[in-house]
Image: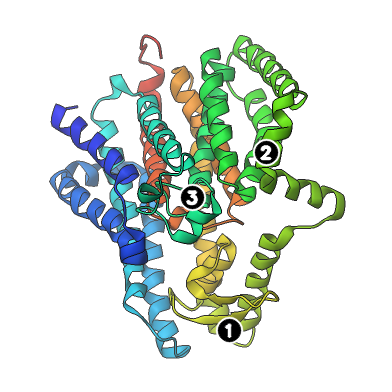
Amino acid sequence: MSKTGNFFFYFIVLYTFSFPIFVNNLGSIGNILINGTLILFLSPIIIKNNKYLVSQLNKNNDLLLILLLIFLYFVIIVLTIFVGSFYHDNFLILRDFYELHKPILYILIILYIYNYFNINTTKFNFDHIFYLIFLILIIFAYFQLDRYRSLTLLYTGENIYESERLTIPFGNPYDYAFVMTFFCIFFFYKYALSKIIFIFPFLISIYLLIETGSRSNAFAFLITFLFFVPLLVLFSNFKMRIKFFFFLKSIILISILFFFLNSPFSEKFFEEHDMVYLQFIDFLNYGEIGESGRNRFEQLNIIVERSLDNPMMILLGNGPTKGLELGKTSDGIIYYSEHLESSITYIYFRYGLIGIILFTLLFLSILRISLIVCRNLKSRLKLKVFNLSFLTWIISIPFGSIGGVFFEQPRSSFFFYLLIGIILCIKSKIKSLNHTNVKNS
């Protein structure tokens, strides 16, 4: 990798995760400062390397499939804008057409990452990227939690700032929690399968996840951590010695957590973060899903009822019409189409059953690729830990997606497709990776 190529890559990462969008001055249009700039930066590189990438597409069916599904997403956006405008009489605004850039950006991100990491197989190590992003998030967390108001309001709205939920550099706490869930999983595996020192970033990532106040992502992490993580490790191709230490370290970690729960610090901690855990207690005891959960179900009911009399709306949705007033909840809150929170509601409203099928195929394709890598990658402990982290994170997404549409938002979508590009790159190099003995791999 050339020094220029390395510099540009780290510049892209730093820019994406640190540049403000001036939301209180520009509104949601400020997101184009991230997505639009990424398109401008990445397009020349893809054009320059088009011959190599075309050759890869000709022999890499997985890469071709993922890009084809994302391109179909672009086609569906165009189609649903047309259908919504002519068949549902939806009033289009300029911001509706901004949605067209998203699939283009996602394709560019995957191609750029795939191209960048295919240049040099012998230094196939991604950990430093995650350390850098995690460090950026810690720095922003320090400033927000210490109430640096002027900085915080460059990234998020006044209402989110007043809620005191950890958010920046993302636009809302759910996107932050979505990304932090990966780091919780990643650092746990690094601790349990590699070095004990990683218990510290793991505990920090857990704390930051709790500070977001995102119950859906906390729930997603708990479900995957308690049920899927042990099974994935048990049936993985790690050596028996590594599996033994995994379960031993897990027991040590659980013991530490129980010690904390019985310490005098725990009472104060839970008092300050009751928003997260009290809802779980109410759900287990009374089946109560809370106001936030009720609002999400009401949103879904409104969307489904609205579509029942229109087969075209069931099939293709309304398109990305953001200014449409959908109705009011039982609390008297007016819901506009751009404020839909749950992923299933968002996709069904915009793109109908066709959209749900498309995103399901994309999810299952990514899951299949990661499972293949998990089964076939024999060496390279760091890569195996990353892939297992990615696989676990992907499994957690359906549970967490009830809280937000993370894969559509600036920064969090970059992170999502960054990881997809990496896993596609690993998949394409499995044979050479298994036959290359790399020190400290």
The one nearer the camera, 261 or 145, is 145
Q: Name the residue under label 1.
A: 311
Image quarter for residue 77?
bottom left
Query: Can residue 388 be seen in this snapshot?
Result: no
Q: Name the residue under label 3.
A: 175
The answer to the question of whether label 3 and label 2 lie on touching residues, with beta carbons closer than 8 A, is no
Tell me the SS state at disc 3. helix
- Work out whether mark 3 precedes mark 2 in sequence or the reverse, and give the earlier one: 3
Instruction: Name the front one of labels 3 and 2.
Output: 3
The one nearer the camera, 409 or 234, is 409
Tell me the SS state at disc 2. helix
Residue type at numbered disc 2 = Leu
The one nearer the camera, 23 or 112, is 23
Query: Can residue 68 be seen in this snapshot?
Result: yes
Q: Position of residue 400 (x, y in %)?
A: 60, 50
- Work out whether mark 1 precedes mark 3 in sequence or the reverse, and give the earlier one: 3
Q: Position of residue 186 (x, y in %)?
A: 52, 29
The residue located at (52%, 82%) in the rendering is 325
* Label 1 environment density (alpha carbons within 10 Å; few <14, some 14–19, many ≥20): few
Instruction: Name the front one of labels 1 and 3.
Output: 3
Tell me the SS state at disc 1. helix
Q: Mark 2 points at which residue?
A: 222
* Label 3 environment density (alpha carbons within 10 Å; few <14, some 14–19, many ≥20): many
The residue located at (80%, 51%) in the rendering is 282
The answer to the question of whether label 1 and label 2 lie on touching residues, with beta carbons closer than 8 A, is no
CA gap between label 1 and label 2 equals 38 Å
The one nearer the camera, 270 or 146, is 146
Image quarter for residue 435?
top left
The residue located at (19%, 54%) in the rendering is 40
